Amino acid sequence: MPVEELVEQRHLMQSTVANLKHANDSQICRDLSQKLESIRESRRSEQDRMQEQLQQLSRRLQGARSRVDASKAQREQKSHAEVMRDLETEKQAAGDAIAAQESRQSQLNADIAELERQLQTLDDNIERQMVPDEGVLMLQILRGLGVEPLANAQTGVVESARVWTPKSACVVPVRSDTQEQQLPPHKLAARLWDLCA
């Protein structure tokens, strides 16, 4: 293979790798940003709804207290048993509402804690998700440049590669006879890269 063609292919590969990494990083950043914003918006909406429910419960409780106070003026006209029954009914209704609201508050706190955990997981994984596997990426680019890995039909191990040129093609080995397992992607890509040199 002429030296000029090899140099041109090497420059093309380096430029393509840089462009693909930049595009992948930008897309991953946008996706993560959208996920984080969606989680925060859901949490804000749930907190606003919870606050409104608490305010409604407070108004109901105040109304119950007002009715209890008003009932005191009627004690002379009602028996003691009737007054206590009415007060107990109001107390039970208010207690049930408070218990239900406290249960909902506990569930909301658990949901918020889970969202925070997921958010932290996303933050912890940003670096790992933004860095692609360069070995796999180089293998894809090498195929596009005419270096075709050839796997053994029985073992599936890449043993050689077909190197295409504008005028011909040749098959060269990429592993020794003592190797029994598939090379890792980055080592295989490096071996194929050496073939272009």
Image: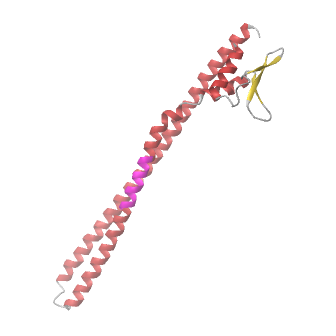
Q: Is residue 191 left or right of residue 165?
A: left
For residue 85, above or below residue 3: below
Whether residue 108 appears in magenta in the rendering, the answer is: yes
Q: Is residue 100 left or right of residue 87?
A: right
22 or 152, nearer to the observer: 152
Q: Is residue 42 left or right of residue 88?
A: right
Q: Quadrant of residue 6?
A: top right
Quadrant of the snapshot with the N terminus: top right
Point out residue 26 in the picture as x, y percentages from the top left corner.
54, 31
- The part of the chain drawn in magenta is 105-117
Q: Quadrant of residue 67?
A: bottom left
Point out residue 43 in the picture as x, y percentages from the top left corner.
41, 51
For residue 153, above or below residue 73: above
For residue 69, above or below residue 11: below
Q: Main secondary structure of the magenta part?
A: helix
Q: Is residue 21 left or right of residue 76?
A: right
Q: Determine the residue located farthest toward the front in the rendered image.
A: 178
Point out residue 170 in the picture as x, y percentages from the top left corner.
81, 18
Residue under the image location 82 percent in, 18 percent down? 169
157 or 23, nearer to the observer: 157
Residue under the image location 40 percent in, 60 percent down? 107
Quadrant of the snapshot with the C terminus: top right
Q: Determine the residue located farthest toward the right in the rendered image.
A: 168
Count of numbered badges drawn on the protein: 0
Whether residue 153 appears in magenta in the rendering, the answer is: no
Residue under the image location 60 percent in, 27 percent down? 134
Q: How is colour applied across the structure in the image?
A: secondary structure
Point out residue 163 in the picture as x, y percentages from the top left corner.
77, 19
Q: Determine the residue located farthest toward the top in the rendered image.
A: 3
